[in-house]
Image (cartoon, grey):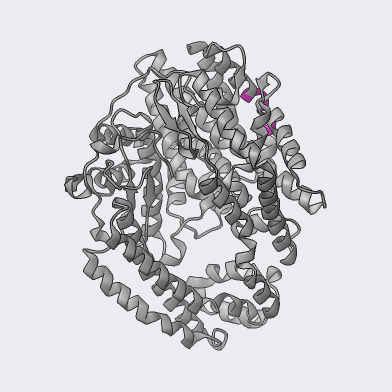
Amino acid sequence: MSSSSSTMPTESLPQRQDVPAEHCWDLSSLYADAQTWEADFAKLDGMIETFATFQGRLGESTDTLVAALDFDRDFDQIAERLGTYAFLKTTEDQTDSDAQAMKSRFQNLAVRAGQAASFMRPELLAIDPQRMDELMDDPAVQPYRLQLERVLRFRPHTLSDREERLLAMQGEMASAAGNAFRQLNDADLKFGHITDHKGRRQELSHASFAQFLQSPDRGVRKAAFNQYYEQFQAHENTLAATLAGSVQRDVYYARARNYESSLESALFPDNVPTDVYDNLITAVRGALPAVHHYFDVRRRKMGLDDLHHYDTYVPILSDVEKHHTWDQAVDVVLKSLAPLGQSYVDTLAEGLRGRWADRFPNRGKQSGAFSCGSFDGDPYILMNFKEEVLNDVFTLTHEAGHSMHSWYSALEQPFQYYNYTIFVAEVASTFNEQLLTRYMLDHAADDNERAYLINNELDSIRATVVRQTMFAEFEKKTHEMCEAGEPLTVKSLRAAYRELLDAYFGPDFVIDESLELECFRIPHFYRAFYVYKYATGLSAAVALSTRVLEGGEQELGDYLSFLKGGCSKDPLDLLRDAGVDMTHPQPVQTTLDRFAALTAELDQLV
């Protein structure tokens, strides 16, 4: 998902009811109105008690197993439709109490349903393996065979009923470290105020920090950076304790469930070997000289004697102006996606020119942007599109990539296999960004615009591949420290992070001592071994987009088959069939080679 970096003044925003209908999404593909939603809600509520009729019987016969799986599928399909509609209604206007109540009621129903169905997974795992093989060999079970195989993969890591009950009882306790971090980070830390480059005194917060780092005034950037990290310095002992607690939780559960490491435990659900993780780190490590060259180019083009972290987010070129109306943005996106074929373009054109997208800001609307696809409804897109922000055109094609991935998967797969995993989710979206970048580079008005677009892509690769890999390496290092019995303290955590900062930013980059505190403020570190998927996703997108642009019908067909695949195969197999092998470092290397080539071109242009 993407989000835009600037917002319109609140006073200029219309009320939701004053927004023209053609600028709003049409949710009737889900439900015509609240009354039809209520009818399905009542139906689903009445279905919950049916789960109990299957408890203790899943292994008795093929008919019973298939009936249980059919019912579970049908229940989930209705639930997805109800939940998607309720969620989307809340995002239109977050002050709409009726929509909030609808969402809350659905969440309550979903919790009750989850409790009622909670017996299914452990009961399937408890069926004698020979008996389960007999059941799965029956042709009637074939539509669910892969689904069952994915459950049964966890058998070596599933404990006795009593042990599983004890682990389940630890759920709230296990989340204590993450909850403590969120309360401190989101509620208790106060950062004061900063005067921006226009002389306006504004509150410094997590959200505004990123905006201050993009200020053209270096004094503002430096002041925001130092003032922001003062708060993390003041609470570093508490933050180190919460981070250590989170790492210790991961290590404990991995050991309890008989995994060789916490990394293996985290990658196991996607059936991803740890080599994929290690290959990513190795490839990015090997390309760090090119990253250091980029920082030197940035320093020189910005006219600075030295480069600090607070100098890395402001655009090197900020005077490029590109104005796009919604229709113009759609036209540019569709032209850039022409290599994907007429069917793809026509389907997306109908959606974007029709009412898939909720286009513009209104009062109370959720900020940023997202795509929300479902099996039964249109793949909706929330935007807060601003005509003067070029990045919003990239956001549009990014979310359109997600939506077309959802559209194709729902079209081609049964419900139980249509919903793709997080590992592949960012491939389709960043693939579209690659095509848009290359199209706009080919049609740049002058060298200044070309340099701006190159800088934009370089910063994207640096943020998504290089920075996220540094985060991934830190997660791996801290978990290995814990697994080896090394204490995780303020000193050891800062030292581990400092080693990475020195390596990734290079010898000519000024590492302010307070930047070491960044290791305490990244929320992703509290759900470790997730960020690597951003890096592998963009790397796969760069490799696949290059393959499609330089290939023919076979290469395009392979990619479209990937979009149609949903979760009908494991993520690595879907990508391999599309033409990219993520168990090999080459896709990451392709992205890093492009980064080096674009850096060299930028050096010549500006």
Residue 288 x %, y %: 66, 27
Residue 494 x %, y %: 72, 38
Q: In this rendering, is residue 254 above or below 129? A: above
Report if residue 362 lies within the magenta region.
no
Asked whether, in this view, residue 35 is left or right of residue 219, the answer is left
Asked whether, in this view, residue 74 is left or right of residue 537, the answer is left
Q: Nearer the viewer, residue 488 or 119?
A: 488
Q: Quadrant of the N terminus?
A: top left
Asked whether, in this view, residue 491 is left or right of residue 28, the answer is right
**Residue 354 visible in the current orientation:** no
**Figure label count:** 0
Residue 273 x %, y %: 67, 52
Query: Which residue is drawn at the image coordinates 35% and 21% (left, top)?
Result: 443
Query: Which residue is drawn at the image coordinates 63% and 53% (left, top)?
Result: 272
Residue 376 x %, y %: 33, 62
Q: Which residues are magenta?
A: 285-291
The chief SS type of the magenta part is: helix
**Residue 17 visible in the current orientation:** yes
Q: Nearer the viewer, residue 129 or 522?
A: 522
Q: In this rendering, is residue 223 above or below 407? A: above
Q: Nearer the viewer, residue 579 or 24?
A: 24
Q: In this rendering, is residue 126 above or below 145? A: below
Query: Which residue is drawn at the image coordinates 41% and 80% (left, top)?
Result: 48
